Amino acid sequence: MIKTDQICVINALKIGDGVEEILEKSDSRLKVHSIFEHAVNLINDNDWIITLLPEDYSAGPQAVILAQEDFAKFKSLGLGAADTLDFNELISIKNSQTIYRRSGYKPAPEDIIKAEGNNIYFESLLSQKGNKNGLLGKENIYSRYAAPILSEFATLFLQKRFDEAGEKLLGLIGLGPGLTPSGDDFVLGVFAAIYSFRMSEDIISGLKDIMVRKAKNKTNIISYNMLRQGAMGGFIEWVEDMADAVIYGDPQQIEAAFSEMLKIGSSSGSDISAGILFGMTNILALINNKEVK
């Protein structure tokens, strides 16, 4: 446990809507899981992660956003992986703004034709500007491995065999490069499309249950936290903005949202976007009862 008696409490600017729940369900003593230039991951005994980020980053359900100088102050403590700290002694979330997930508050889209046109535009934008080192690329080994899985998912999804479709998605977990592997990012994008499109609970529940129960043993704990939240409708703001832009926006909003997505990791933003595109395409096929080409 690090000594905190000489450290002033840092006031968080924003927190994701899952942070208080994580702290309420466990002791406030957390271990340092990993430290990066722009992120510090803290983990509790139940493998829930709270991520500290500076203020120019997008907030997700498990994020605590600090002012730039406060984030630098926290990192100056000289913490190392596996060090233990008392979160409540170091950081106050009392007056922070809570960022709530939008999945339960969006209207179901009414203009399906507009969404279809936006989806075509989004596909073209991804093809032109996306990072193709992950699943967005058509010729790399990861995409070739994923192709039959995605084809089977599309068939099962159109047949409304949603539990079986969810099992297929598990085949992508842990696939590809990155701290959050490309396959995990892609699956997150599929969930973002499903939640943003306000799909019915019978579609969501089977996919969600499978992901929460089975993904943990197929990927690293940081990525699993991302997937577990995504399966429950929790995403960073940039991902929600991207999915919303395709469904409800216009080309300018799609381009603006995608420019933010490209800031996520090396290829993660592109892989999540590819998952959103794939999810949207299959949802539109289900609505129109047409086979995905």
Image: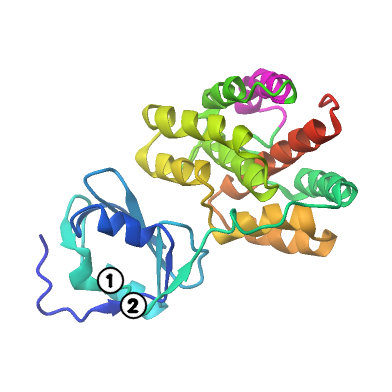
**Quick check: 225 left or right of 235?**
left
Whole-angstrom CA distance, mark 1 to mark 2, is: 6 Å
Quadrant of the snapshot with the C terminus: top right
Query: Label 2 sits on what residue type?
Result: Asp
Q: Position of residue 240 (x, y in %)?
A: 62, 56
Q: Is residue 36 visible?
A: no
> To which residue does mark 2 refer?
70
Q: Position of residue 8 (x, y in %)?
A: 20, 81
Q: Which residues are magenta?
A: 138-157
Membership of 144 in magenta stretch? yes
> To which residue does mark 1 refer?
74
Q: Tell me which secondary structure the magenta stretch mostly adopts.
A: helix
Instruction: Tally the numbered discs.
Output: 2
Q: Which residue is rendered at x = 53% and y = 51% of the image?
A: 265
Membership of 54 in magenta stretch? no
Q: Which residue is rendered at x = 57% and y = 61% of the image?
A: 237
Q: Badge 1, how many Cα within 10 Å: few under 14, some, many 20+? A: some
Q: Is residue 193 visible?
A: yes
Q: Position of residue 212 (x, y in %)?
A: 43, 34
